[in-house]
Amino acid sequence: MNIAEIIKNYYEHEDFKGNYIEFLFEDHDAIIERIEKIVKHEYYFAEKYGNNMQLSNDQLEVIYQYILDNLEDFISDFRSYYVGCTSLDSISYGEQEEQLTGLTNHKTGKLYTISYLRKIFDKEGYCVNGDYAYYDMSGEGLHVDLLNSDIPILHIYISETLTLKSNPALMTVICNIQSMRAKIDHNYNSINDFNNLEKLTGNQLHKLQNELIPEYNKAVKQ
């Protein structure tokens, strides 16, 4: 194996990939937004977890932190520029530059000649320009895939959502809350409010209903 092949093989090594991992998962807000969209709309998410759902800001932060704490479990290689529809973040290897001067043959202890290096690097698919060789890896890299590993807390969130939707008593409480809020506030947005209410527990819903009754009675009398 010649020096060009050895260097090229290094691009497949975990040490090489490790140089790029530290640059993943840095844009907190963009990743949070991406998690929210995948969980809410993506078919492959529903296929794995059984349902789509809308997460609260606090829940999104929990998911973000879990992935960050277990980042390597969610990292995959990508090729041909394609990362998939459940990817949260990615980084390309870009163009690898290798300087051809000063390379030593470790068997003989002598420097390789430039003419020899240009020849073998060109043969391995590098673009040779003067004393440098370039290997295009812009279509390859690493990405963080939401579905690459299991997130236990998501099963709990999904279960809580399904429990609420299948519980007529809690749905009645939500209807009562929305009816009272519509009377109190003429600009009330029932759709947005329902998305928030369905994230609450039964105790929280009952408490909120009781708190609204005095305000609702006051509004009715006006």
Image: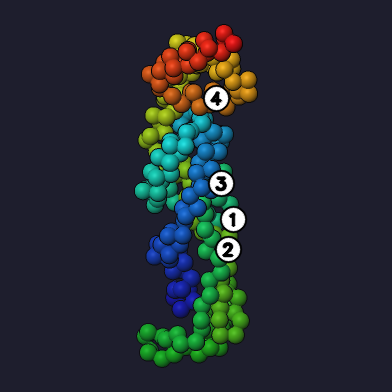
At horizontal 43% and vertical 14% (from top left) the residue drawn is: 210
- Disc 2 to disc 3, C-alpha distance: 16 Å
22 left or right of 41 in image:
left
Query: Where is the C terminus found, in terms of image quarters?
Result: top right
Q: Residues within 10 Å of mark 1 (few under 14, many from 20)?
A: few
Residue found at the far front of this picture: 222
Label pair 2/3, CB-CB below 8 angstroms:
no
Badge 3 element: loop
Amino acid at dot 4:
Asp
Tell me which label, 4 or 3, sits earlier in the chain: 3
Q: Is residue 85 above or below residue 90?
A: above
Q: Give the residue at mark 4.
A: 193
Give me the disc on residue 84.
3
Q: Which residue is mark 1?
A: 81
Residue lying at 55% horizontally and 56% vertically, measured from the top left:
79
Name the N-terminal-most of marks 2 and 1. Answer: 1
At 56% from the left edge and 13% from the top edge, which residue is drawn? 219
- The answer to whether mark 3 and mark 1 are in CB contact below 8 A is no
